[in-house]
Image (cartoon, rainbow, N blue to C red):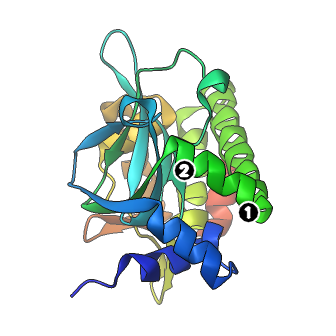
Amino acid sequence: MLPDKLWYLKKIDFFKGLNDAEYDLIDRDSKALMVRKRESLPYYGTAKLFVYFVKKGKMKLLKISPAGHSLILDILGEGTLFGEIEPEHRTDDEDIIAEAMEDTLLCMMQRDNFDRLIRLIPALSIRIIKFTGFRLKKIQNRLVDMLYCSVKVRLAKTFLNLADEFGVPKPDGLVINLKLTHNDLASLIASTRETVSAAIKEFRNQELIECKNHCFVLLNEERLAKLANGEE
């Protein structure tokens, strides 16, 4: 039997340290939503009326070009949110979607309830502002890298960044706890699958990474960091 909704809410970093009355308020004003693997939601919320917290699973934010090509802007793990940007602050990027990378359980909250919640709990508002600013900065840095860095440098940076967020130390290396395809990595660094596959083969030959059970394992973080800094 799955834990109840309140148990999940207390595990989300945004909500840690709140009092029982505040937890009850969040519990009352939200509901659970299961999104199956490869299902998607508009990034700005269904009909622009909802905000989502990831309780369990992983979502990726995809920007779709007019030609139909996709760019992964970010990957959201447990405890993160999307759809939080207020309507008047949005750009015209209505072609951004959030797609489930695996079966994912979300906490879904109506926009007016969310706005009321952050007015009532100032600490929550500060956490969300910091998170949103960090995510935007991370996306901006990646876009700059796409303009000025080689594919191998971009790929090395991506592996290291993903390891920071999703890395699990194991005896044989740092496992990135994400099942990523070569297409996913190509979408993350704005390259082609063929080019990424060639770079991955080179990294494996140099014993920088390996792949086990569809997850990448970092074998030599120090050398990857040098490569990411353009030192190799």
Foreground pick, 113 / 210: 113
Q: Are marks 2 and 1 in contact (CB under 8 Å)?
A: no
Instruction: Residue 207: give x, y in percent of width and height.
Output: 47, 66
Where is mark 2, residue-wise? 113
Question: As displayed, is residue 81 above or below residue 70?
Answer: below
The image quadrant of residue 138 is top right
Foreground pick, 23 / 199: 23
Please give the name of the residue rendered at 38% of the width and 75% of the height, measured from the top-left corner: 5
The answer to whether residue 20 of the structure is visible from this angle is: yes
In which quadrant will I find the N terminus? bottom left
Please give the name of the residue rendered at 57% of the width and 64% of the height, measured from the top-left corner: 165
Disc 1 marks a residue whose amino acid type is: Ile
Q: Quick check: 102 left or right of 146?
A: left
The answer to whether residue 197 of the structure is visible from this angle is: no
Secondary structure of residue under mark 2: helix
Disc 2 marks a residue whose amino acid type is: Asn
Of callouts 2 and 1, the N-terminal one: 2
Cα distance in 3D space between marks 2 and 1: 12 Å
Q: Quick check: 185 left or right of 51?
A: left
The image quadrant of residue 133 is top right
Instruction: Residue 34: give x, y in percent of width and height.
Output: 25, 59
Question: As displayed, is residue 183 above or below residue 131?
Answer: above
